[in-house]
Image (spheres, grey):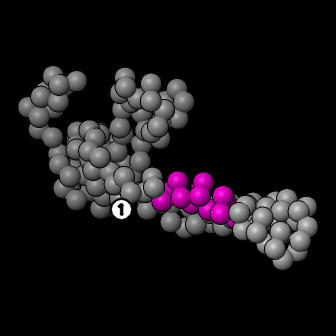
């Protein structure tokens, strides 16, 4: 997904960019904007040597959303299913469904927090500045919006 952003800070091969919230964003709620936020800042790979204050076109990879959905929602459901199967077939007591679920799901979220700490900062590798916009390109974009 391509978006317009403003470079706030340049740090070597990475840059901190700001994406302003659009009017459509307030109705949707599917993006990363926190409630009542007017903009979002994050790191992007600066492959075009953009400078502070430049208006740029960024490209964000969407594949990370599917991975996040699987890790946050699908894996706990599988753990609950496995807890149920183990409790019913091996232990043969239904109360163990609750206990195994209460152990496995929070343990998974602890593992997920560690994964996020280690690999969650890789957004700069999935977001790239692909073009520094000229004044005429900025005007054309403003006219379309």
Most extreme residue toward the bottom is 90
Q: Is residue 80 left or right of residue 72?
A: right
> Which secondary structure type mostly characterizes the magenta part of the structure?
helix
Q: Is residue 58 left or right of residue 68?
A: left
Picture quadrant of residue 115:
bottom right
**Residue 38: x percent and y percent?**
44, 28
Residue occupying image coordinates x 20% and y 52%:
130
Residue occupying image coordinates x 91% and y 67%:
93
Is residue 77 one of those drawn in magenta?
yes
What residue is pinned by disc 1? 125
Most extreme residue toward the left is 136
**How many residues crowd around disc 1 within 10 Å: few (fewer than 14), some, or many (20 or more)?**
some
> Where 145 falls versus 45 (above or below)?
above
Residue occupying image coordinates x 22% and y 44%:
57
Q: Is residue 81 left or right of residue 118?
A: right
**Residue 43: x percent and y percent?**
39, 52
> Where 6 falls versus 105 (above or below)?
above
Give the magenta part as a residue range.
Answer: 67-79
Query: In which quadrant is the C terminus drawn?
Result: top left
Residue occupying image coordinates x 48% and y 59%:
67
Picture quadrant of residue 132:
top left
């Amino acid at each position: 997904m391509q978006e317009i952003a403003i470079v706030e800070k340049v740090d070597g091969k990475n840059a901190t960019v700001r994406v302003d919230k659009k009017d459509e964003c307030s109705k949707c709620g599917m993006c990363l904007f926190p409630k009542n936020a007017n903009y979002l800042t994050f790191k992007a790979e600066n492959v075009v040597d953009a400078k502070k204050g430049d208006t740029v076109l960024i490209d964000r990879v969407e594949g990370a959303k599917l991975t996040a959905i699987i890790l946050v929602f699908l894996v706990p459901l599988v753990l609950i299913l496995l807890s149920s199967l183990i409790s019913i077939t091996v232990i043969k007591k239904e109360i163990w469904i609750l206990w195994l679920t209460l152990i496995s799901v929070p343990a998974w979220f602890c593992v997920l927090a560690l994964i996020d700490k280690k690999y969650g900062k890789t957004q700069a590798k999935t977001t790239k500045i692909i073009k520094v916009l000229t004044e005429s390109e900025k005007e054309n974009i403003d006219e379309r919006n």
